[in-house]
Image (tube, rainbow, N blue to C red):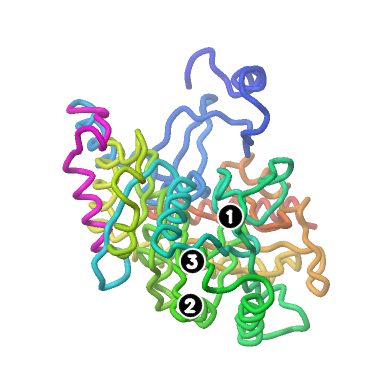
Amino acid sequence: MIPGVHSSTLHKRRQEAVPVGPYNITPLYIESAAGTIIKDVDGNTFLDFAGGIGMQNVGHCHPKVVKAIQEQAEASIHSCFHVMPYESYITLAEKLNERTPGNWKKKTMFLNSGAEAIENAIKIARKATGRSIVLSFERAFHGRTLMTMSLTSKVNPYKLGFGPFAPDTYKMPYPYYYRAPYNMVPEEVDLEILHYFEQFFLTEVSPYDVAAIILEPVQGEGGFVVPSANFVQGIRSLCNEYGIMMIVDEVQTGFGRTGEWFAIEHFDVVPDMITMSKSIAAGIPLSAVTGRADIMDAPEIGQLGGTFAGSPIACAAGLAVFEIMEEEQIVERARIIGARMMTHFHHLQEKYDIIGDVRGIGAMVAMELVKDRSTKEPAKEVTAQLVTQCWKNGLLALSAGIYGNVIRFLPPLLTTDEQLDEGLQILDNSFAKIVR
C-alpha cells in the first residue's frame, strides 16, 4: 500500500485529467503485479483472469522478462531500427519465421500494436496483389485505427460516430454455431457461408479485386466464437482459388493461449501472413507481421516502418518470452488450464440455466449467458453484475460478445492449480449471489 494514495482519490483525479473514452472495467488502481496476482494501491489482491486482455500469457513481471528489460535499458533504450539497427530485432524475427506455421521462406517486421500490425499486413497484401478490397467478418475486432475500425464489426462502442470509414472493406458471415438459425448443424452453417462467398463474388465484387481476407481463428471481442476446421479450410481454398492473401489475426490467440503456439494450428491451415501482439512481449508494446518472404518483400524500401517499431527493449522482452515459452512448457500448461476451466464451466452450466453455451480452445474459454435457453435472449445485465461481483471478491474477468453477454477468461498460462481453484471458487460464489 502506498501511504496517502487510494483508488478512490486516484479515480477522482482520473475523471478530471483523462477523457471518458478510455474505459475502465474496475475503479481499482494497480500498485504491483507478479504472475497471476495483482495488488492495488489499497492493499487488496486480485487473481488476474483477464491477463491484460490476453497480454500476460507468461504472467506479470516474469523475472526473465524484467531482467531482459533492465539489461537492455542499461545498454541502449532507442536508436530507431531505421537509423542504426540492432541484433535483437533480427534474432526475434528469425525465431518467429521459424516458429510460425508454413514451410516456405518467411520474413518478419515489427510494429507497436495489434492495430499497427493489421494496418501493415493490409498494406503489404495490397502491394503484393495490386488489389484494394479487404474482407473481414461479422463480430470481428481488429483495432481502433481507421482501417482496423473499418474492419471491425461491432458498432457500439467501437465505431459509433467515428465515420466515414475506410473504403473497399466488406463484412462476411462467420460461423456462430450456438446461434445458428433453424437449428442448423455446423456443416450446414459452413456450407451456407461458403456459398455466400461465391454469391458475393458474383453480385458484389470480383474476387480478382480482393487483396486479402482477414480472419480471427477464434473471435476474441466477438465472444470467443470458434469456427470449424472445415470453415477455415474453406476460406483457405477460396484464397488459393482467387489469389487472395489470407491474413490471420493472432493478436489475442497467439503465444500458447489456445494450447498451440498459434491458434491457426488447430485448423490445419497455413495463412499467407500472421499478425501478432499482446503476449509477444509480456506487456511491452510490440507487434509483428510474419509472412511469406515474397509477399513481405513486395513493399519497396522505405514503404514500411515506424519510429518506435520493434524497439530494443521490446525485442529484448520478446526474446525473453520465447525462452519462457520453450523452457516452462507454456503451451502444455494452456491445455491443462483450459481443460479444467471447461470442465468446471460445464458443471456450472448444469446448475444454472442462465449459462447457454460454454466454448473455447485451450485456455481461451468463455460462457454465454442467456435469459432463456430456448429464445437465447442475451442476459447482458446479469453478465455485467457477475463481472463486477467477481472483482469485488478478488477475481478479474472480462465480458465480451456483440450482445455483451459473454464472460471470458484469459488467465496467465503460469497460473498454479491452487490459484485456478481459488479463482473458480470466487466465480462459483459470484453465481450463487447474483443468479437466483
Q: Give the range drawn in magenta.
A: 75-99
Q: How many labels does the image show?
A: 3
Sequence-earlier tag: 1 or 2: 1
Q: Residue 340 carries which label?
A: 3
Residue 48 in the image: state x and y as whole percent: 50, 45
Quadrant housing the C terminus: bottom right
| Direction from residue 188 to residue 79 in the image, left or right | left
Q: What residue is shown with label 2?
A: 242
Quarter where residue 10 is shown:
top right
| Nearer to us in this view, 10 or 308 | 308
Q: Which mark is residue 233?
A: none
For image coordinates 23% across by 52% down, the residue present is 323
Q: What element carries label 3?
A: helix
Amino acid type, callout 1: Phe
Amino acid type, callout 2: Tyr
Residue 422 in the image: state x and y as whole percent: 51, 51
For image coordinates 23% across by 44% down, the residue present is 89
Q: In front of the other: label 2 or label 3?
A: 2
Sequence-earlier tag: 2 or 3: 2
| Nearer to us in this view, 360 or 4 | 360
Q: What residue is shown with label 1?
A: 141
For image coordinates 49% across by 44% down, the residue present is 52
Question: Mark 1 to mark 3: distance in Å?
Answer: 27 Å
For image coordinates 53% across by 32% down, the residue present is 44
Asked if residue 237 lies in the magenta stretch, the reply is: no
